[in-house]
Image (spheres, rainbow, N blue to C red):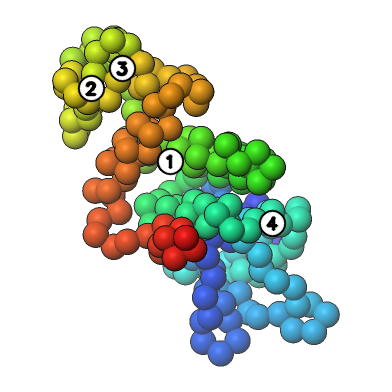
Amino acid sequence: MQPLCPAYILHSRPFQDDKLLLQLLMPEQGRVSAIIRKRQGKQRFALQPFQLFTVALTGRSSLKTIRTLDELAPASRFSGKFLFSALYLNELICRLWPDDMAAEQLFNHYQQSLAGLNLAQQQPTQLEPCLREFEFALLGELGLPVDWQHDAAGMALTADLQYYWQAEQGFVVWPGGWSGAALLAIGQQNWQHADSLLVAKQLSRLLLKPLLGDKPLQSRALFTTAL
């Protein structure tokens, strides 16, 4: 009997006449492509994103088959920019996380971010911190962590100096760049600092760009079309 494992559905699309192709996020298996038959009658229920399931997978190839899938918790309900933000998290994982690479910590970060987006629907000022924290957590899990304490030369960041990011090196002193105070605040997740959110957004986009390439993010376009 196949073991049951927790999973989130990141993306789904029709596959053949009676199946769906799902992208799953699972702690031990990571991002997994799997096929499931469409459910009919009393067995039918919506395969919601942002909902925790348990699944049993079979198959030896990279494309798995879902033998059982059960709801483990209610789906998080998002709307407007909070929905677009949740879709953004899913798209980042689908685009950047390698196939079949274990994702225990990423799975935890993702769960925490969904909870953060739920909170942000009641406290909208929490939206951007939630997104930035996930982006930097994802970069760290991909082997690209940001050292918020030291520059590229190993010297401690200084609040009174200004810095810019040098690819494959880290922060370098750069007059007219980001304030050291803002960088130190981001490292402490101190989003009350006046410049921390703006600097965090600029830096995360700079770091994500070479990973994402030239293909635009569909979820990011939703923000533009909704304005």
Q: Is residue 184 left or right of residue 74?
A: left
Q: In which quarter of the image is residue 122?
A: top right
Q: Distance between the residues labelled 3 and 4?
A: 38 Å
Provide the residue designation for mark 1: 135
Amino acid at dot 2: Tyr
Secondary structure type for disc 4: loop
Task: Name which of mark 4 and mark 2 comes first in the sequence.
Answer: 4
> Residue 5: image x %, image y %?
65, 53
Q: What residue type is labelled 3?
A: Gly
Helix or strand or loop: what does disc 2 sit on?
A: strand
Q: Mark 3 points at which residue?
A: 180
- Distance from Cα at disc 4 to Cα at disc 2: 40 Å
- When the figure is inspected, residue 215 is found, relative to residue 26, above or below; the finding is below
Mark 3 surroundings within 10 Å by alpha-carbon count, few (fewer than 14), some (14 through 19), many (20 or more): many
In terms of secondary structure, where does tag 3 sit? helix
Q: Distance between the residues labelled 2 and 1?
A: 20 Å
Q: Residues within 10 Å of mark 4 (few under 14, many from 20)?
A: some
Residue at the (22%, 30%) spot, across then down:
165
Give neighbour class at mark 1: few <14, some 14-19, many 20+ (Cα, 10 Å).
Answer: many
Of all residues, the one furthest to the right in this rendering is 42
> Do tag 2 and tag 3 residues touch (Cβ < 8 Å)?
yes
**Mark earlier in primary sequence (2, 3):** 2
**Label 1 residue SS:** helix
Amino acid type at circle 4 is Arg
Which of the two discs, 1 and 3, labels the residue nearer the N terminus? 1
Q: Is residue 2 visible?
A: no
